Amino acid sequence: MTTHMRNEIDEIPDAAARLLQESAASLKEAGQALRAKDPAFLITIARGSSDHAAHFIKYAIEQQAGRAVASIGPSLASIYNKSLKLDQAAAISISQSGKSPDIVALAQSAAKSGALTIALTNTLPSPLSEASAHPININAGPELAVAATKSFFNSVLAGLAIIAGWTADAELQRSISALPEKLRQATRLNWQELADELGEAESLYMLGRGPSLAIASEAALKFKETSEMHAEAYSSAEVLHGPVALVDRRFPVITFAARDAALASVRETADGLAAKGALAFITADGATSARRLPFVETGHPLTDSLALIIPFYGFVEAWSRSRGFNPDAPPALKKVTETR
């Protein structure tokens, strides 16, 4: 029987198209508001997969808009009852349910402190949408599997659409418009070679750099959620500063490489780990030792990075089932986690 998770992975192209069509006006308004505000810096407010989406958006804003972005712990408001001086800032909150108390509390605090507030949520109305000046319906549709897939994807895509409008980046806008069809190709990609080689591995590394580091972080979380398998995400630069000591013969390493300025250095790291005996895979052509994983090219470095998560989702769903797990319902997790 097909799992909810597999169905939801296959729905991502349609969910992306729905977001771009049905939320077009609110995405445009948020971009215009950022242009008018011209924030000196931005903060993000999120947890779990949504925080990985925020991490991706952070890199995109810093690269495209030249503004520093910081992730702020929601407990600052909900537990410590502190506020920040944010009158020159914008705040982006991300929550699938839109009702986690700590996320809502910090979004409310940011608004009171003078920030331009934007919420990316799959649930409108919700406490988070009501706390934000610009609530965006990410339009992922109902998500039944505990492990988030299409809501993660659409949260990032909504962020990219806002950035493209804010910066009037025609190249990024064209790539975003063409993305749903590229995603249909991505859902058909097969990473079976990776599954065949993992065998009885109990731990692995996920590597990336820039926006693809956020993808590596999301991938590591999905291994833990769906397969109870230890996985850690590192920058392809940071992994060489200590974590590489654990890499020996057939230690699995998956490197998420996009067609961007970091490609050469990321590929070099993957090849270097393969030379040490690691079971190294990379989403890129041109590696000399690391093995190639299939990917799609989308016409822009940022959408290239985002599309990498699609074949991984398909792989990890099948891997989970092959290990005797139900990826729809991990025993220790629930769909909506409300933290204070």
Image (cartoon, rainbow, N blue to C red):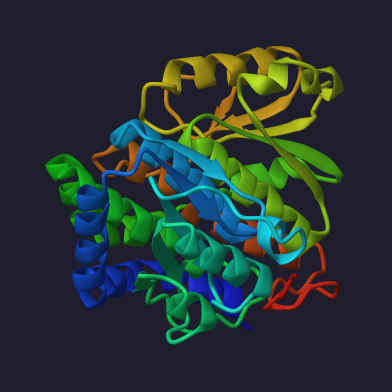
Q: Report the label total.
A: 0
Tell me, yes or no, if residue 123 can be seen here.
yes
293 shown above or below 246? below
Among the 4 quarters of the image, the one containing residue 332: bottom right
x and y percent of residue 278 in the render? 74, 23
Q: Nearer the viewer, residue 297 or 220?
A: 220
250 shown above or below 320? above
Q: Which residue is found at the position 55% from the left and 63% from the top?
A: 109
Q: Which residue is found at the position 28% from the left and 49% from the top?
A: 163
Tell me, yes or no, if residue 307 can be seen here.
no
x and y percent of residue 70 in the render? 53, 41
Q: Which residue is found at the position 56% from the left and 78% from the top?
A: 97
Q: Which residue is found at the position 33% from the left and 44% from the top?
A: 39
Q: Nearer the viewer, residue 259 or 130?
A: 130
Among the 4 quarters of the image, the one containing residue 246: top right
x and y percent of residue 295 in the render? 42, 43
Q: Which quarter of the figure is the C terminus placed in?
A: bottom right
132 shown above or below 197? below
**83 to the left or right of 152:** right
**312 to the left or right of 122:** right
Q: Which quarter of the figure is the N terminus placed in?
A: bottom right
**75 to the left or right of 37:** right
Among the 4 quarters of the image, the one containing residue 225: bottom right
